[in-house]
Image (spheres, rainbow, N blue to C red):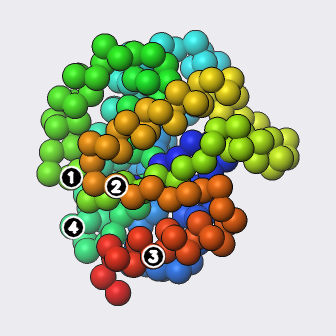
Amino acid sequence: MLDSGEGAGKTLQLERVQKHFGDRVLVTREPGGSKYAEQIRELILHSVYAQHADAKTLFALFWASRADHLAKTIIPALEAGKTVITDRFDSSTYAYQIIAQGAGELKDLFWKVREVYLGEWKPDLYVYLDVDPAIGLARKSGQGPEELNHFEARQLEFHQRQRVGCKEFMTKVPHRVIDASKSIDGVWEDFRTVLEEQIKI
């Protein structure tokens, strides 16, 4: 599982993963990753009402998307012997909804839902690309006029809280942190090394 704040280069790193490891790995994403989950993704990120949805609403939608993603994509791939790397997972729900959106009252529920929904299918390792949000957002703005979703477009303080949330989550699961303030090649070397320790070559 790979997570990060905005502008850490996560998408570029996952493109390299696919080229380097080929069909030994399945790279997927959240929200989304299955046909039904992709429809929920549209509701979460692109509905005209999404930016005004509270943390409890988004929490429920993310877990609904994740359940279908797990059942239709992740578990079948694992059972077929593939390594699955997902672009975001439950760590993002914790960081964005519970911490960045300020819904601390959902913490206990999060861990209970996680146990019910993921069960034996929890990720073996979480990798977090860590970059200062100010740097990440500056990178994002320098990438051109691509339309931002309502999470990406929020103020710096929101992204700072998201970083705090991701780091808090990582302390509770098997994880590795990679310094994403490095060059793309430098981050790739660190990420590839971590993956080669996990993937049977």
Dot 2 or dot 1, earlier in sequence? 1
Q: Gap in Å between the C-alphas at discs 2 and 1?
A: 16 Å
Residue where numbered disc 1 is placed: 121
Dot 4 or dot 3, earlier in sequence? 4
User: From the viewer's perspective, is residue 134 above or below residue 150?
Assistant: below
Structural crowding at the residue carrying mark 3, measured as other residues with C-alpha within 10 Å and reported as few (<14), some (14–19) or many (≥20)? few
Structural crowding at the residue carrying mark 2, measured as other residues with C-alpha within 10 Å and reported as few (<14), some (14–19) or many (≥20)? some
The spot of residue 38 in percent (x, y) is 48, 42
Residue where numbered disc 3 is placed: 193
Residue type at tag 2? His
The circle on residue 24 is none
Q: Gap in Å between the C-alphas at discs 4 and 2?
A: 23 Å
Residue where numbered disc 2 is placed: 175
Q: Is residue 149 visible?
A: no
Q: Nearer the viewer, mark 2 or mark 1?
A: 2
Q: Where, by quadrant of the figure, is residue 68 drawn?
A: top left
Q: Gap in Å between the C-alphas at discs 3 and 1?
A: 24 Å
Residue at x 22% of width, y 22% of height:
108
Q: Gap in Å between the C-alphas at discs 1 and 4?
A: 11 Å
